[in-house]
Amino acid sequence: RRLFYKGMLADTVEITGSDAHHLMHVMRAKAGQQIILVDDANQVARMEMTAFREDAVTLTLLERLEADTESPIDLILAQCLLKSDKMDMVVQKAVELGAVGVIPVRSQNCVVRYDAKKAAARQQRWQKIADEAAKQCGRTALLEVAPVTDIKSLLESENGQQDSVLVFFYENEDQQTVKDYLQKITVRRIVLLVGPEGGFSLEEAKAVEEAGGKSVTLGPRILRAETAALTAMSVVQYECGD
Ligand code: SAM
């Protein structure tokens, strides 16, 4: 979440027009949430949204940030839901490893039960973890945690994405290594799909592959889901980003 501001950074900045509309009505931002602001002179700062009017959002300076720490690729982790502490850890590490988004995904073999009533609270909790991690590791963009989706909706929303690939980390893939695959691609946006503790069903694997997801292996051993997620993000940044 970065906002390019046509003006100069100050202790308080008022955002109006389409940017204010985007914050309020698309991102559904709330007071207390943070955003990274980049001004006309390329100064970067972490700001807090402190007040909302009908057509304007007030941002208050929290801290100025020095150098840009962002990777040249847009790395997004689509992670099937894991047990609470594991999911928290994966979100935190996704920030450290330079991802710009985490999409929590429901799938057939998830061990955790999905509770729709708690979904918004969990999303907010993960977002808070992500914002704290961004501060700790000096990110100059904030990772956005999406609402929980399912595999079918994920595949639909990925369909037709420009300059983008969906890399499918599949425990039953034994041919295509992630390294070989990554060396063949030159795209800006890379989405990694990693399974839950129970892995993917055959039906899900077929659907992902039919929708254009490229299945890859991380090697001959079955990794725990959280190990697979962290390894996947690390190798992608190593090969394609920084
Ligand atoms: N229950 C599954 C089984 O016994 O085959 C294992 C699932 S594994 C614990 C969880 C997820 O981590 C997988 O769905 C996959 O996304 C990823 N993963 C684990 N090991 C992998 C490997 N060697 N290559 C690619 N992905 C892997």
Image (cartoon, helix red, strand yellow):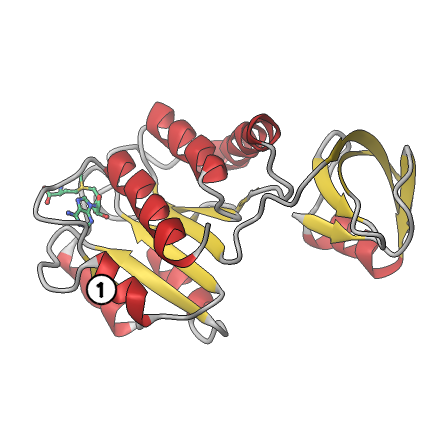
Quadrant field for ligand 1: top left
Q: Which residue is mark 1?
A: 180
Element type where label 1 sits in the image: helix
Residue nearer the viewer, 15 or 163: 163
Q: Which residue is located at x 24 percent, y 69 percent?
A: 209
Residue nearer the viewer, 118 or 24: 24
Q: Is residue 106 visible?
A: no
Left-right relation of 210 to 159: left
Left-right relation of 85 to 216: right
Amino acid identity at mark 1:
Asp
Looking at the picture, does residue 225 appear above or below residue 23? above
Give the quarter of the image for residue 164. Answer: bottom left
Residue nearer the viewer, 1 or 178: 178
Looking at the picture, does residue 10 appear above or below residue 5? above
Classify mark 1 as within 8 Å of ligand 1 or not, answering yes or no. Answer: no
Q: Is residue 169 visible?
A: yes
| Residue 136 locus on image (x, y percent) | 57, 26
Looking at the picture, does residue 171 appear above or below residue 127? below
Looking at the picture, does residue 119 appear above or below residue 207? above
